[in-house]
Amino acid sequence: RCDVALAVSAAAVGDSSAKGGVHRHVIEEVMDILDMAQRASQRRDVFHTSFLTPPIIAEAMLAIEKLADIKAVAQGGYPQAERCRISAGHPDSMRSDPDVVAALSISGNFRLEPCSHGDFLGAILGAGITREKVGDILLQGERGAQVLVDPELVDYLTSTLEKVGKVGVSCTQIPLLAIEYEPPRTKSFKTVESSLRVDAVASAGFKISRTKLGSMISSGDVRVNWSLVSKSGATLKAGDVVSVSGMGRLKRHSTSAGF
């Protein structure tokens, strides 16, 4: 039964890959999640993943929907979370959302020493934490940041994290309801370009020159579907999401070049 269910899901992931160019590593990770979810369901248990990237979350949740006797929920700590953990298992064992995400407040005086997302992440990883144990990091300007983590890390981080960059910090647990986030602001636009290359479309959408966009690609600041872009000439397909560090995202809605 497990093999049959996984075969069905593999076909679903394969279809998605054929249509949207899903990366092989995404397919492999999704298949691992499906396997563990099926085992958890058979044992009337619940399986929890580490924090996952948006492409893996989307493909895994889509594939799990095709499996009988499995319920799944993705949680990142707040409604717009990018990095989430998936909990999956038998419906009888999933009557309430599991408590799999905790929030930390990392506070300090960052007025004279502003720190970036990478600085906060680096401080956490420098404490010996692996990336998959950390969810979103929400910057709060000169006050610091709020970070979503695996609950198992709360005691360790609150007792050991003392600096971010050159700034001394205090790290405390806060309720998930205390997370401060802004609902996404969106607008649509249309552009006429000679091609659907990522550098052409993104430069128009973010209103920056193609030369600057090319430099940002080289610096690792541009992603398509949350994967780093290595070439300016990559072609965008319907549904692709382009994100530029510090500038936001755009999504191609259709073949008519609407975004």
Image (cartoon, rainbow, N blue to C red):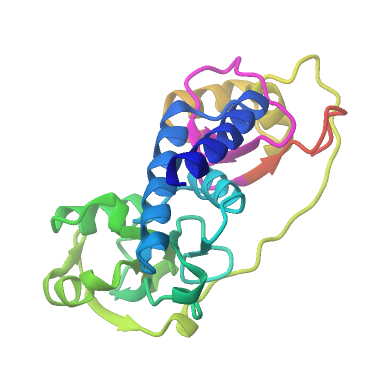
Q: Main secondary structure of the magenta part?
A: loop
Q: Residue at x 26, y 81 (%)?
A: 172
**Residue 119 spot, x, y in % from top left:** 29, 53
227 to the left or right of 225? left
Q: Does residue 255 sit above or below 58 in this rendering?
A: above
* Residue occupying the far front of the picture: 1
- Which residues are the magenta region? 223-248
Q: Residue at x 65, y 32 (%)?
A: 208
82 to the left or right of 36? right
**Residue 253 spot, x, y in % from top left:** 79, 38
Q: Residue at x 30, y 81 (%)?
A: 173
Evaluate whether residue 46 shows in this view. Answer: yes
Count of marks overlaid on the render: 0
Is 125 a magenta residue? no
Q: Does residue 259 sit above or below 108 in this rendering?
A: above
> Which residue is at the front of the view, 142 or 77?
77
**Residue 226 spot, x, y in % from top left:** 51, 39
**The quadrant where residue 143 appears:** bottom left
Quadrant where the C terminus sits is top right
**The quadrant where residue 257 appears:** top right
